[in-house]
């Protein structure tokens, strides 16, 4: 249970403010997260980590000499946006390139990859290693699909130690990849976690039971058992991890291993020590040499009661790097020589609010865009609980609140743009940027892509033809597939978007007006979204718990269909209330 907050919507932001105020010796705030407040040598590779908030000390608590140079910090359990990652990476860059590492979650991958592309286009070299330590989240032959949990720490530390030792970007990447290949984790939970202001936990574990194979965002476990004794839990954890020894480890006997027993948020240290007592014995019995054991909280899941065991299988190069000293707000090892503080000059002033020129016709269309964005926000508000509920069945339950944050940020940005006299393109572009910036998560990034694509076809001069709107929707549909790599049938919003775009284009090509074609397309999208109930998810967070979701439609497809339908009605309402029926944007 989380008890203290002001406005739940401000929680993550206020948490970062307080964290920075308490740790100015280590970190300073920049748009999108934090970077070191101490100087780093010119040319040193910058290690940038990140993810949603709610996992402290991951990720901001791991910024400082010997560990990360910066952390992009998203909203609670939501990926940072592309803009946030770009902003933190630029502030962290020392001229030696940027090395990104984070847990392998769909939303994070989308946003960090997009940021990486943007930075490369600006001439900043970037490489990425996503952490995939959680053994239950995919089979060994699909290891690249596994999610990252407490194993983040080993990969971050090895990358950072290599950077600190002067390795170049390619070498940092090679070593981090090796660390990831040699890190395996496995976890359990006794209770779910409850986000600030939420009435219900994201998931529950029945009293006296234990969820096996939890995810750190409340993704349900893959199995459930009675709670074992402390020794019984130690045996379960060690047995599972010794059943999958990484390639390259010649023999278990004599292997040198760093064990990390990680608390998920509300497990007592004392309980973990009782469990660790048995883990140490079991590892010794297996002939394993334990190096620098860790028992504590390294990657939490808000107030979840649970724990995971990580085994990091060292080799000589990794063990040498593991000795490097670290000094961060939440994690210290060895002694770091004092570092000079940098001037906390506020980074990047941020874009100006001035809008480019637009003619009167386009400003009138901007009014329609604003009405449509308002409809989107109202539609999401009306269905926020339902969308969260569907997402909780196989995903993490945040689809409603994520869409709400995104659509309201979009509405505020569109309103400001219209007040400043913007044309249709600029208005929708501002809305799209605000959406992806504030929503976080996978769907936030994808809605940013959809709206940006439509915006590009609207222009800031004249009223667009209906065909231009259809072409914008088609480009958005293609953009979502290019960006998220999902195809029709993977049980994502693509299943509703593709038929929506196709029906809209066909209707308009066949001579229908925008309103009629839009309404027909929305009806097709609605049936397609409902039909996703029968599918097994193959993309996104829901993939791990696919079987749970059969019988329930995909939340992203449902929200898209609801929005398409409501926007159709808004366009129809504007068309009938508009005396000037010749107007192209409502025709
Ligand atoms: P997150 O998955 O980051 O928690 P949301 O809960 O807001 O984000 O959105 C979940 C929705 O995002 C899913 O229901 C699905 O429609 C959509 N989605 C997830 N991954 C992809 C992808 N790769 N391509 C297209 N849509 C996706
Ligand atoms: Mg979700």
Image: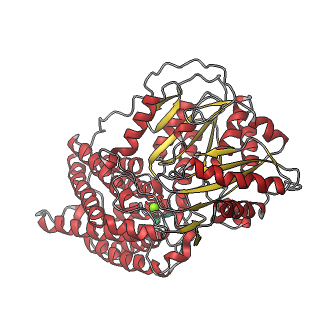
Quadrant of residue 237 in the image? bottom right
In this orientation, which residue lies closer to the viewer: 30 or 23? 23
| Residue drawn at x 54%, y 42% as measured from the top left | 57
In this rendering, the answer to whether 14 lies above or below 381 is above
- Ligand 2 occupies quarter: bottom left
Residue 117 x %, y %:
57, 45
Q: How many marks?
A: 0
**Where 149 falls versus 46 (above or below)?**
below
Image position, residue 489 (x, y; %): 53, 75
Q: Which image quarter holds the N terminus?
A: bottom left
From this view, report whether residue 280 is shown above or below residue 242: above
Of residues 95 and 70, which is closer to you in this image? 70
Q: Which is more toward the observer, 95 or 464?
A: 95
Residue 16: percent from left, percent from top: 43, 38
Q: Is residue 262 left or right of residue 170?
A: left
Is 460 on the left or on the right of 444, as rendered? left
Above or below — where is 331 with respect to 311?
above
Give the x, y percent position of residue 10: 34, 44
Residue 575 falls in which quadrant of the image? Answer: bottom left
**Residue in the image at 45% along x and 21% along y:** 345
């Amino acid at each position: 249970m989380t008890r203290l907050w002001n406005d739940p919507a401000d929680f993550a932001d206020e948490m970062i403010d307080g964290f920075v105020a308490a740790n100015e010796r280590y970190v300073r705030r920049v748009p999108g997260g934090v970077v070191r407040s101490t100087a780093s040598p010119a040319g040193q590779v910058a290690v940038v980590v990140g993810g949603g908030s709610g996992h402290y000390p991951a990720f901001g608590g791991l910024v400082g000499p010997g560990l990360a140079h910066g952390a992009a910090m998203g909203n609670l359990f939501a990926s940072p946006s592309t803009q946030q990652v770009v902003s933190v990476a630029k502030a962290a860059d020392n001229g030696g390139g940027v090395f990104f590492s984070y847990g392998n979650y769909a939303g994070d991958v989308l946003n960090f990859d997009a940021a990486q592309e943007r930075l490369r286009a600006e001439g900043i070299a970037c490489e990425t290693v996503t952490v995939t330590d959680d053994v239950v989240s995919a089979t060994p032959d699909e290891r690249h699909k596994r999610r990252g949990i407490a194993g983040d720490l080993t990969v971050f530390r090895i990358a950072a130690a290599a950077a600190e030792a002067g390795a170049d970007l390619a070498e940092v990447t090679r070593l981090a990849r090796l660390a990831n290949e040699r890190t395996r984790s496995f976890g359990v939970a006794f209770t779910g976690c409850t986000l600030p202001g939420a009435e219900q936990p994201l998931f529950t574990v029945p009293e006296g039971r234990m969820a096996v194979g939890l995810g750190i965002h409340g993704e349900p476990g893959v199995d459930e058992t009675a709670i074992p004794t402390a020794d019984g839990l130690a045996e379960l954890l060690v047995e599972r991890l010794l059943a999958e020894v990484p390639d390259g480890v010649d023999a278990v006997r004599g292997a040198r291993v760093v064990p990390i027993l990680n608390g998920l948020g509300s497990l007592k240290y004392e309980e973990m020590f009782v469990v660790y007592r048995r883990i140490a014995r079991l590892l010794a019995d297996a002939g394993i040499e334990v190096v620098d054991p860790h028992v504590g909280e390294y990657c939490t899941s808000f107030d979840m009661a649970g724990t995971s065991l990580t085994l990091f299988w060292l080799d000589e190069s990794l063990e040498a790097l593991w000795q490097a000293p670290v000094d961060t707000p939440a994690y210290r090892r060895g002694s770091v020589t004092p570092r000079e503080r940098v001037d906390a000059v506020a980074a990047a002033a941020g874009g100006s609010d001035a809008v480019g020129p637009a003619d009167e016709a386009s400003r009138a269309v901007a009014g329609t865009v604003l009405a449509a964005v308002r409809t989107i926000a109202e539609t999401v508000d009306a269905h926020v609980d339902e969308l969260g509920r569907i997402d909780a069945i196989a995903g993490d339950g945040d689809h409603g609140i994520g869409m709400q944050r995104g659509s309201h940020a979009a509405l505020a940005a569109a309103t400001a743009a219209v007040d400043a006299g913007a044309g249709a393109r600029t208005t929708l572009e501002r809305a799209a940027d605000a959406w992806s910036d504030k929503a976080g998560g996978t769907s936030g990034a994808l809605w940013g892509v959809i709206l940006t694509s439509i915006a590009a076809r609207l222009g800031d001069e004249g009223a667009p033809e209906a065909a231009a709107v259809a072409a914008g929707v088609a480009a958005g549909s293609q953009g979502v597939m290019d960006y998220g790599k999902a195809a029709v049938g993977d049980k994502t919003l693509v299943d509703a978007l593709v038929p929506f775009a196709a029906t809209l284009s066909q209707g308009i090509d066949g001579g229908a007006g925008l309103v009629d074609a839009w309404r027909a397309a929305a009806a097709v999208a609605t049936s397609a979204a409902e039909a996703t109930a029968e599918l097994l998810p193959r993309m996104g967070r829901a993939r791990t718990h696919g079987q749970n979701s059969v019988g329930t439609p995909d939340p992203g497809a449902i929200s898209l269909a609801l929005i398409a339908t409501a926007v159709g009605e808004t366009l129809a309402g504007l068309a009938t209330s508009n005396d000037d029926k010749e107007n192209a944007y409502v025709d």
